[in-house]
Each structure stands twice: as C-alpha cells, then as structure tokens.
C-alpha cells in the first residue's frame, strides 16, 4: 500500500487546491501540481516523505490570494 504522507483526510464532496512550497529545492512534480484543484477523492499523494507542500480546501479563491504561496515583492525602479 502506498503511503500518502498527509496528516488529514479529504471530503470527497469538497474541492482542494495544491499549494507548493516553491523554494529552491521544490521538485518538478510539486511545481507541476501547484495551483491545481482536485475533488477530495482525487487529491494526489505527496510525492515524497519530506514534501513541504500543502493541500487546502478550495473556495474559488484565486491562487494569488493564498497565504502559503510565495509572492515576490515588486522591484522598484
């Protein structure tokens, strides 16, 4: 049986969004999942044991408003 590495369960009637940690060591698999929305019964397993990504309940919020996503400060001229 495959380990899923999540410490929570997902309601199959709700939607969830994958939020990648987006650091220097973020793997390609996690980068490719960032911002994708899944039904609770289709949330992918974390791809590795030390994954720092999160899955949060999705309420139609745009990805730019999610607090766990790193947003760079604009550069000043």
Image: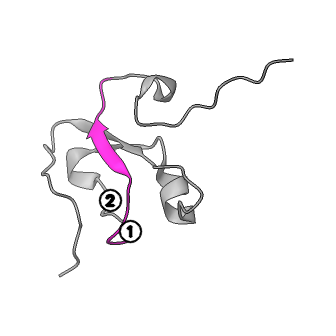
Residue at left offset 71%, top offset 23%: 74
Give the residue number, with chain letter if any, for mark 1. Answer: 47
Task: From the top left corner, tell me how far across and down residue 64 is, in percent.
Answer: 51, 26
Q: Tell which of 32 and 49 is nearer to you.
A: 49
Q: Is residue 21 left or right of residue 58?
A: right
34 vs 62: above or below: below
Q: Closer to us: mark 1 or mark 2? A: 1
Q: Residue furthest right?
A: 77
In the picture, the quarter occupied by the C terminus is top right
Whether residues under marks 1 and 2 lie with C-beta atoms below 8 angstroms apart, the answer is yes
Alpha-carbon span between mark 1 and mark 2: 8 Å
- Asked whether, in this view, residue 72 is left or right of residue 36, the answer is right
Q: Give the magenta part as a residue range.
A: 47-59
In the picture provided, is 25 more to the left or to the right than 56? Answer: right
Q: Is residue 19 above or below residue 23?
A: above
Name the element at disc 2: loop
Res 58 quadrant in image: top left
54 within the magenta span:
yes
Give the residue drawn at x 12%, y 51%: 9
Query: Residue 8, position in %: x, y?
Result: 14, 52
Q: Residues within 10 Å of mark 1 (few under 14, many from 20)?
A: some
> At 48% across and 58% down in the image, what residue appears?
30
Mark drawn on residue 37: none
Measured from the top left, where is residue 2 in percent x and y?
23, 78
| Callout 2 crowding tier (Cα within 10 Å): few <14, some 14–19, many ≥20 | some
Pick whichever, 13 or 21, lies toward us.
21
Type of secondary structure dominating the magenta stretch: loop
Q: Secondary structure at mark 1?
A: loop
Colour setting: one colour
Q: Residue at x 28, y 39 (%)?
A: 56
**On the image, numbered disc 2 is attached to which residue?**
44
67 vs 12, left or right, is right
């Amino acid at each position: 049986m495959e380990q899923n590495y999540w410490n929570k369960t997902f309601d199959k009637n709700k939607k969830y969004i994958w939020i990648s940690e987006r650091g220097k060591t973020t793997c390609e698999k996690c980068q490719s999942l960032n911002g994708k929305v899944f039904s609770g019964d289709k949330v992918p397993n974390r791809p590795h044991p030390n994954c720092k990504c999160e899955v949060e309940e999705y309420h139609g919020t745009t990805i730019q408003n999610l607090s766990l996503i790193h947003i760079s400060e604009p550069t000043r001229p």
